[in-house]
Amino acid sequence: MNDVKRAGEAELELRELERQRCDAIRRGDFARLREILHPDLLHVHAKGQVDDYASYFAGGGTHVDYKQIDRYDLKVRVLGDTAIMSGRQLLVAVRKDGSGTVRIDSRVLQVWTLEGGNWRQIAFQTTPTELSIT
């Protein structure tokens, strides 16, 4: 199989994994997220907080109920066993304590790595273009 075809197949797989990642977040499916995210994860949130794999899952859940996570304008560059994904993300969530709604429109940069035949997200950075917390 040539490199172009392999990269095209990897891009399709990565786009599907990103869809699954967003779906798992909405559903609170932490088991699936643990499969998608790499153990050496570096996750930078919209307000600058930084999580590794352990802290990302600490506490058994999140303080918000995700209502919407839409990804668009995704671009994927496959570079051997590494891929860079960038694009826009619209996230809407309601605080579980009822204290308000969070809406973040952002640009996102992700790094994926191929290990043992499986792609896993190893880095995530989101930069808000619009942040609304009510």
Image: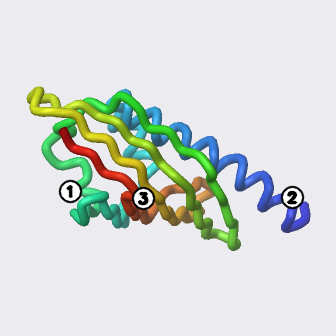
Element carrying mark 1: helix
| Residue underneath mark 1 | 55
Q: Earlier in the sequence, mark 3 or mark 1?
A: 3
Q: CA distance from mark 3 to mark 1?
A: 13 Å
Q: CA distance from mark 2 to mark 1?
A: 37 Å
Q: Residues within 10 Å of mark 2 (few under 14, many from 20)?
A: few
Name the image quarter holding residue 39.
bottom left
How many discs mark residues in the rendered view?
A: 3
Question: What is the number of the mark on residue 63?
Answer: none
- The answer to whether mark 3 and mark 2 are in CB contact below 8 A is no
Q: How far apart are the two marked residues, 3 and 2, measured between alpha carbons? A: 25 Å
Name the image quarter holding residue 123.
bottom left
Residue at the image position 66 percent from the left and 58 percent from the top: 75
- N-terminal of the pair, mark 2 or mark 1, is 2
**Kind of residue sitting beneath label 2:** Lys
Mark before the other along the chain sequence, 3 or 2: 2
In the image, residue 32 lies at what x, y percent? 42, 38
| Residue 90 shown left or right of residue 83 in the figure | left
Outermost residue to the bottom = 79
- Name the residue beneath numbered marker 3: 38
- Residue 82 in which image quadrant: bottom right
Q: Name the mark on residue 5.
A: 2
Residues at marks 2 and 1 touching, judged by CB atoms closer than 8 Å = no
Query: Secondary structure under badge 2?
Result: helix
Residue furthest right in the image: 2
- Residue at (46%, 33%) from the top-left corner? 23
Residue at the image point whose x is 30% and y is 59% from the top: 45
Q: How is the image coloured?
A: rainbow
Where's residue 42, x and y in %?
35, 66
**Disc 3 element:** strand
